Every structure is written in structure tokens, then in C-alpha cells.
Image (cartoon, rainbow, N blue to C red):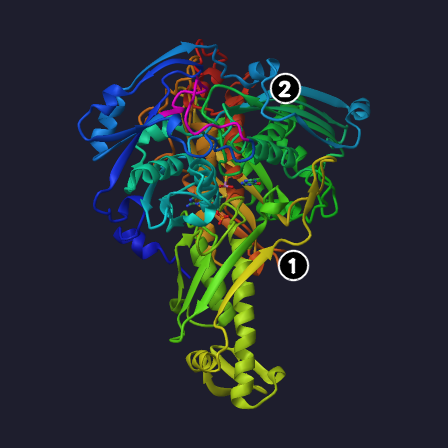
Amino acid sequence: MKNIDSTGHTRGESIYLDDIPLLRGTLFGAVYGSPVAHGFIRRLDVSGAEETPGVVRVFTFQDIKGENQIGGIIPDEPLFAEHHVHFCGMPVAFVVAVSEDAARHAVEKIKVEIEPWPVVTDPRVAQANGELIVPPRTFRLGDVDQAWSLCEHVIEGRADTNGQEHLYIETQGAYAMPLENDVIRVYSSTQAPTAVQRAISKVTALPMHALDIEVTRLGGGFGGKEDQANVWAALCALACLHLKKPVKYAMPRTDDMVMTGKRHPYSSDFRIGVDKDLKILAYEVTFYQNAGAAADLSPAVLERTLFHCTNSYFIPNVRATAYSCRTNLPPNTAFRGFGGPQGMYVIEAAIAKVAEGLGVDAAVIQKKNLHRTGDIFPYGQLAESEAHACWQKAEDLYDIQSMRREVEAFNGSNRLFKKGIAFMPVCFGISFTKTLMNQARALVHVYTDGSVSLTTGAVEMGQGVNTKMLQVAAAVFSIDPGSVRIQATSTFKIANTSPSAASATADLNGKAVQMACVEILRRLKEVAAAELGVAVEDVEWREGMVWVSGAATELDWKKLVLAAFVRRVSLSEHAHYATPGIHFDPSKEKGHPFAYHVYGTAIVTVTLDCLRGRYVIDAVKVVHDFGTSMNPLIDRGQMEGGIVQGLGWMTMEEVIYDEKGRLRSNTLSTYKVPDIYSVPEEISIDFLHTQRDNLAIFRSKAVGEPPLMYGIGVYFALRQAIRAFNPSTDLPFSTPLTPEKVLMGLYDKKLEHVPG
Ligand code: MTE
Ligand code: HPA
Ligand code: MOS
């Protein structure tokens, strides 16, 4: 089944925030963000803005009716700066005017005098200053200190990954409108309608039942709208409450890039020990997470880094410590993989360094240490592993021997071009790491004409979740998918939702849909039994018909539905699903936090131009564990998108803040994302079909985030190519590996000035 949105998207008919018809009298907002990364506000003068033609009002912290606080995990994030600013772009004032132009023009008239304070952008400096968002966490397995003496080789190093701009096509924004009796409806481009509802409730002091947050779809979220849509929605709602007028704010791209947080940069130290057979005996790692100026989701991201610090490998002795460091950058936030990629990069760097030191192929070490079913993760859960199955199938299917021969032959016969090849195994845990978030609800109505309406807590952001929800209902009812319609996500229809995130949206909401449909079907079978005068045990529902004792009857879907209505049997159901069997005890750092893991292996090949430092990615060939995919077309799209987003992070996407904490890469001319010319020439995806029972909806495993991490393989393939040219290069483990850095590595030069 194709994505139900493909026709609308292709024709430009799909509705995003900016396509919602405006009510008469709608006002427009613009944010004045701090020009300074850290300091004390001596004087704020908004009179110039207030006097600008078209301006209705300028809001500051003094206009807040509830609390000036939008922090989700930790209350450390004011909506408006009061007396201090902590990052460039921190909202100081919100101008509301009769037009977008007037509002933006007025923002430029605001004057502020700020006493500058020292700016910290480096997480290691923040950690040394004791600036931590939460106390450090440590995951332990075995006894690392004892294990070092058993190792044949022990190698240490440092690895750094940079941030990443989400660059959703639709920027952040919201449109708030007053209904009667202080009820506000907010259209928000958010992955988390309930988080928006809570934030607005806190800021406006309105109860949650007065706040209808509605989302039809997003033009991309990628984690950037899990927590950070709250700000703009709260600003619009606050203005709406004061002015009793509809207020809209859709961010200009540069404001979005400057004011919102990104993927967390990490700086990490590792120590790894192997025995003479290249078995990894011990691994110690310290992560310094650059959290930015407020907690946002950083503690949860930090946790997922620890959960993924050993990737697909079984390591008997592990000690992993993570610091969430407060700096003067915009609060960094969720981004596809949610800290997992940052953790995996470091173990892959450690393995690469061992391989380079010993002169062996990294793939030998990787393969030897893949975990098997029954192996324990450092956090106590036992693996149900497909790691070997994926790896072995990749080796066989893609004929690794001839791939290797090809690379060797090429490198032997070319002096100025070199190829590199790398494996990238992935193991990703599915579930929110906070157990309580693993719950969802669905509301199903069957109308008397037989059409079905479906509302869930899921937000469609391009990942195809609505299509999957529709497939679940159509499958349970065994009716044509065309008679099921997905309704916009709304806090008035589905309450207390978790964000659409953690790749778990289809599982959580899909299970709730399944439960609701199964319950309606159960009642319909009773109706059929009564209509036909047979025992309910003899009634069967399949192919859109009632069957009794193996024979089809007259009762089809429409007749059955109508019969239920006539008999006054409910044709609606609201179901609640909570993932069973998961738990985690943070005081011990042990438990069973994930419903299951997703596995896969990618083989990446690249060709490097050793004169220019430029490169092409020849191929990314993957064997991926989809379980039993319920929508191979959508899942393939998630794979391709994830891989390209991951390799963008590893190679060309360079977030640069200067020493004053100002974002220099604040436009699409200074921040480069993969385009059609830089994507791999070949992406091959093989589906490892597994029939194993699991907690995935219809055994179709979650696919949203895991493929991003295959992109990490591109870094290591490039590194191999550089070493084929210059075997003694001391290229640091530092990403993105831009062509400039590649060139330095090829000729062992240091960049004189690395900004940021
Ligand atoms: N795919 C598209 N097209 N757009 C997105 O914003 N977000 C990713 C992934 N795939 C995203 C996407 C992220 S960060 C997550 S967590 C999952 O989709 C969320 O959706 P799911 O839980 O339905 O997989
Ligand atoms: N993944 C994604 N988003 C989240 C998580 C998680 O584990 N926890 C809280 N938000
Ligand atoms: Mo995705 S980073 O969990 O929104």
C-alpha cells in the first residue's frame, strides 16, 4: 500500500501550518532574540517597536499570567528572558502586529543593553566549571579495572561528533485562536501536542481542558519538534489570550536556525582492551554532552547514549560515564537517534583505532564481538540478537570478497584516487527510555454508512505513521483501506499523549488502534450471532463478511454495522495500550527498558580524490531487520532518508558557533546538507525477514531512527581511503569529515583555525 499522503503531497494539496486559511483579524508575531550569548540585561527598551506602524503590542516576561517556565524534564527554561540571557537568540520579547512585515520590522527597533558575561561553548570547560544539567550517570558491567590486566592490547583516544541542524522543510510555528470562554485552539507544528498543551497551560494558567492543540501533519520534525515547538506555541497562545485575537507565528528560516537547539555535539574519551584473539574484554568511555543553556531533553538523550555505548557488541566489562554539560548555546534537543548515534560513533572509533594500531581489518574485530541472543547489555537486558544474521547475510549477499578485491585492485592501480570500505552494524533499542512514556490511545468510530474514523496520539511528520494506522484498522476489520480515514491529532480527542518519537509511534498507537478495533469487532460478532440466531463461537469475520460454520452469510460490513446501530450497540471505542514487560531502575542503572531491539549491518564504499579532498559515496549496502514489514515502501523510504541524514551528519553538515556563541552557519548557503549530487550512487536495502514474536505492531519493527546510524559507516570508509593514501595519518576522530578535513588528513596538516 502506498503512502496515503503521496497524492496530496505531489499535488501540493496537503495542509501544513502555513496552508491553514487565516481568520479575519489574524495578527502576526515576531521574536526578538538575545544578541548576546550570556549576560545581564541592564536595560530593555521596546518603545521603538511599540511605536512602529502596525504593531499591536510587545510582550515580555511581565505579561505572563502563569509561570515563566517551559522546561519539560527540569524547570530551568524561562519562556522569556527576565534579567539574564543564556544563549544567542533566547526570546526576550514577542512583537505582535497586523502583518508579518510590520512585526519583523518592529523587532529591529528594540534596544537592549546587556552586561556581557563569560561565554562557554565547550562541554569539557563547562564540566570542569561544575556546570552540569543533571548529576553524571554511570553504566557498569563486570569489572573494568581488573579486566585491563587481562588484555593483550589497550588503546586510548578521543572522539568528537558535532551537532546537526534538523532542517525540517517546514520551519517551526503555531497559530493560536480564541474560542469562547477562554478556550484556545492552537495549530502547532509539533511532534508533541500534549507537551505544547502543558507548556501553554503553565504559561497562561489556563487548565489543560481549555487548550485544544491540533496537528494535521508536519513538514518534518526529526526530533526538533519534540520539545522545541512549545516555545512558539506558548508565545502565540499568550498573545491570543491577552488580545482575544488569532495570532500566528511561522518562523523565518534564519530565526529557526539561530533560536532552536540541534543534535548534541559530544566530546568523548575512550579506553578499550582486547585479548590476543581480538575479543574486546574491556571498554571505558566518558561522554561530555554539550547540552546548551537549559535541560530540554538532554538528560533523556544522555541516557540513550549510555544505552547504546556498546552498539551491537558484547563486551563483558564496561564502564560508561556521561556528563550533561551546560553551555551558552541554544538548548540542544532530540534528533533522530536521540544520543544513540553519538554513543555508537565512539565505540566504532575505538575499534578502528585498535585495528589501525594492530594492522588488522576493523571488520574482523567488529564481527568477532557482535553479540548473540542471551548476551547481556550493560544495562541488564538480554539480547534477542539478529546481529550475526544481518552481518552474515550482508557478507554473502553483497559478496564481500569481491568488494574487497575491487577496492584493493583500485587502490593498487591508482595513486591519486583511493577507495575505502567499512562495515557499520547497528543495534537500536525501541521504547522511550522513560518507561511511563510508553503508552498510547486510539479513538475509533464506525459510522452507520460503514466508514471508519480513526484518531490517535500519533503525529504524521512524513514517516508514514498515518498510513500504518489506517492499515491496522483496515486489517483488523478486513475492510477496504479506502473506507478508513485518519483525523487530525488533537488534545481534545486524545489526551495525555507521548510525543511522536523514539521510533515507537506506530507500535504504541498502532497497538491501541488494534485493541479498539478488536473490541468493536467483538461486539459486532455478538450482533451477527443475534441476527443469525447462532452461537457467537460459530461466527467468524473475514474478507468483509460474516461466516457461520465455514460458510459465508448475507451479512456484510455495512449490514452488520447498521444492525449494531439498530440494536443500540456502540460502534465506537477508545483503547489504551501500555507496553508490557518493560522497566528500568535508574538507581541501579539496570532493567529491561526496551520492548525489543532493531538490528542491521551496512557496508559502505567510498572513492576519494586525494588531490582535492573531495569524495563520492559509491554505495551503502544494507541488510536490515524489519521484522515483518507492514509497509515495505514506506520502510524503504525511512531507510534511504535515514542513511542520507546520517552521512550528512558525518561528512558535510557543519554547525559552527564562534567563541561568542553566535551561530555562523545560520543559512542554507553556510550550512550544507546532502543534495541529489552528494547522495550515494547506490543504496541497496535487503529485508531480513524475521518471524520471531515481538512487541512490534504486526511484527513490523520500528524503522524511524535506526537507519540514520548506517551513515556513521561513511566516516570510517573515508578514513580507510585516507589511510590508503597516507598510512601514517594522525587524522583525529572528529566529525563532520568535510573535504577540508580530509585534505588535512591526507597531507598530515593541521587546520590553523578551526572555528567553533
Ligand atoms: N521521517 C520523516 N520523513 N520525517 C521526520 O520528521 N522523524 C524521524 C523518523 N523519520 C522523521 C522521519 C524521527 S526522529 C523519529 S523518532 C521517527 O521518524 C518518528 O516516527 P515513528 O515513531 O513513527 O517512527
Ligand atoms: N527517545 C526519543 N524521545 C524521547 C525519549 C526517547 O527515549 N525519551 C523522551 N523523549
Ligand atoms: Mo525522534 S529524535 O525520537 O523525534
Mark 1 or mark 2: which comes first in sequence?
A: 2
Looking at the image, residue 579 sits to the left or right of residue 559; the answer is right
Q: Position of residue 208 (x, y in %)?
A: 47, 46
Count of labels in the image: 2
Q: Residue at x 55, y 61 (%)?
A: 575
Q: Secondary structure at mark 2?
A: strand
Q: Magenta residues?
A: 75-92
Quadrant of the rendered image containing residue 98: top left
Residue 433, placed above or below residue 130 = below
- The residue wearing badge 1 is 693
Task: Using a 10 Å C-alpha cutoff, classify the residue at mark 2 as few (fewer than 14 neighbours), some (14 to 19) or many (20 or more).
Answer: some
Residue 585, placed above or below residue 476 = above
Quarter of the image with the N terminus in it: bottom left
Name the residue type under label 2.
Gly
Q: Position of residue 729 (x, y in %)?
A: 54, 16
User: What secondary structure do most residues of the magenta stretch adopt?
Assistant: loop
Q: Secondary structure at mark 1?
A: loop
Q: Position of residue 420 (x, y in %)?
A: 51, 30
Residue labelled 2 has its Cβ within 8 Å of some atom of ligand 3 = no
Q: State the separation of the CA atoms marked 1 and 2.
A: 40 Å
Q: Given contact means CB atoms under 8 Å apart, are the residues at marks 1 and 2 in contact?
A: no
Asked whether the viewer can see residue 551, the reply is no
- The residue wearing badge 2 is 157
Residue 403 magenta-drawn?
no
Looking at the image, residue 360 sits to the left or right of residue 545; the answer is right
Asked whether the viewer can see residue 523, the reply is yes
